[in-house]
Amino acid sequence: MVANAATAPGETIHAMPFEVRGEDVLAALVSVGRLARRIRAAAKLPEPVPHVPRTKEST
């Protein structure tokens, strides 16, 4: 999970002046996602579409 990877030993997140756990990162990501949805809805913008990387065959 990306939230746990962000808090792995040696990551720069440990430079914060407080402890940051994987659960904290996950909660922040969920919160930002909700905020972004509200902002897009208020601006009448569409939801983003998932990124699908191109393969060598499709280029």
Image: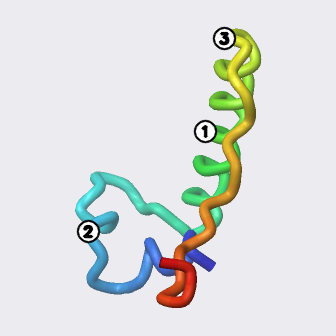
Task: Return the disc, 1 or 2, that comes first in the chain's sequence.
Answer: 2
| Quarter location, residue 31 | top right
Q: Is residue 20 left or right of residue 38?
A: left
Q: Is residue 6 left or right of residue 15?
A: right
Q: Give coordinates of residue 8: x percent, y percent.
A: 42, 83
Q: Give coordinates of residue 47: x percent, y percent.
A: 74, 36
Mark seen at residue 32: 1
Mark seen at residue 12: 2
Residue type at tag 1: Val
Q: Give coordinates of residue 49: x percent, y percent.
A: 70, 49
- Residue at 64% x, 30% y: name it: 36
How dense is the environment of label 1, judged by Cα within 10 Å: few (below 14), some, or many (20 and up)? few
- Residue at 73% x, 13% y: name it: 44
Identify the secondary structure beneath mark 3: loop
Q: Real-space Cα distance between discs 3 and 1? A: 16 Å
Residue type at tag 2: Thr
